[in-house]
Amino acid sequence: MKILIVEDEHKVSRFVERALSEQAYTVGVAGSCAAARDALAESPYDAVVLDLGLPDGDGLDLLREWRASGFNEPVLILSARDAVEDRVRGLNLGADDYLPKPFSVDELVARLRSLLRRQGTAPRATVLEHRGVRLDLLARTVTFNGGEVELTSREFALLELFLQNPRRVLTRTLIAEKIWDASYEMETNLIDVYVRRLRMKFDPAEGEPLIKTVRGSGYQLA
Ligand code: CA
């Protein structure tokens, strides 16, 4: 199995290269978009580990080019950009997984192995469903009991966050970090406003509201 690492930080690429070589993968390294284009044109790879911030461009542009040209092998994005919207963009453009930096190299190896195993078998989940809500990550559409629902991009990201974490209590701090990329004290009642909007748009005729308040902690998908 041959894996291409596209990463401009030598320390990171050497570290990943060593870990993958230890697992008996053959590894190629490209430090720029141009080098990555050349590497993939020269020889076939079974998977790509892709950094986004590259000296001569954006990794997402590379990904878009590759998918448009029919390169179908797994791509795992490795990036310091950790907002939900960035992840959604990467997945929309055809990435198979997304690991935020800083990362554990063991987790990277495990995820790559699972991507390579999955390749060619099950289609990947791009639709999230829960109690009549259906969110399509590729088409970026949401329906509720079959009817289309209009969402702003923040509402979409917030709904996705809940659907991706069905049993988890999401604290306001976590929601602020994931959806607003807030490293500062934000008005947490903004989150309450957004949750209220989602509840109004997805109001089940019976049973609990879709997003329930966990007093003193945050919110949970119900
Ligand atoms: Ca970089």
Image (cartoon, rainbow, N blue to C red):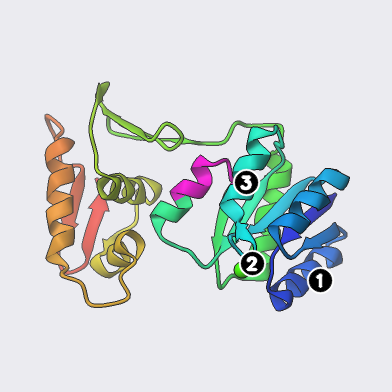
Pointer 1 residue: 18
> CB at mark 2 closer than 8 A to ligand 1?
yes
Residue 89 included in the magenta stretch of the image? yes
The numbered disc on residue 55 is: 2
The numbered disc on residue 63 is: 3
- Name the residue nearer the viewer: 53 or 177: 53
Q: Give the range drawn in magenta.
A: 88-96
Which of discs 2 and 1 lies nearer the camera? The answer is 2
Label 2 packing within 10 angstroms: few (<14), some (14-19), many (20+):
some
Q: Earlier in the sequence, mark 2 or mark 3?
A: 2
Q: Residue at x 18, y 44 (%)?
A: 198
Q: Which of marks 2 and 1 is nearer the N terminus?
A: 1
Mark 1 secondary-structure assignment: helix
Q: Residue at x 30, y 70 (%)?
A: 182
Q: Which residue is drawn at 47% across and 53% down?
A: 87
Left or right: residue 100 versus residue 148 is right
Q: Quadrant of residue 23?
A: bottom right
Marks 2 and 1 sit apart, C-alpha to C-alpha, by: 23 Å
Left or right: residue 56 versus residue 138 is right
> What amino acid is labelled 1 in the image?
Arg
- Ligand 1: quadrant of the figure: bottom right
Residue 156: x %, y % from top left: 30, 44
Marks 2 and 3 sit apart, C-alpha to C-alpha, by: 16 Å
Mark 2 secondary-structure assignment: loop
Label 3 packing within 10 angstroms: few (<14), some (14-19), many (20+):
many
Mark 3 secondary-structure assignment: helix
> What amino acid is labelled 3 in the image?
Leu
Q: Earlier in the sequence, mark 3 or mark 1?
A: 1
Residue 180 included in the magenta stretch of the image? no
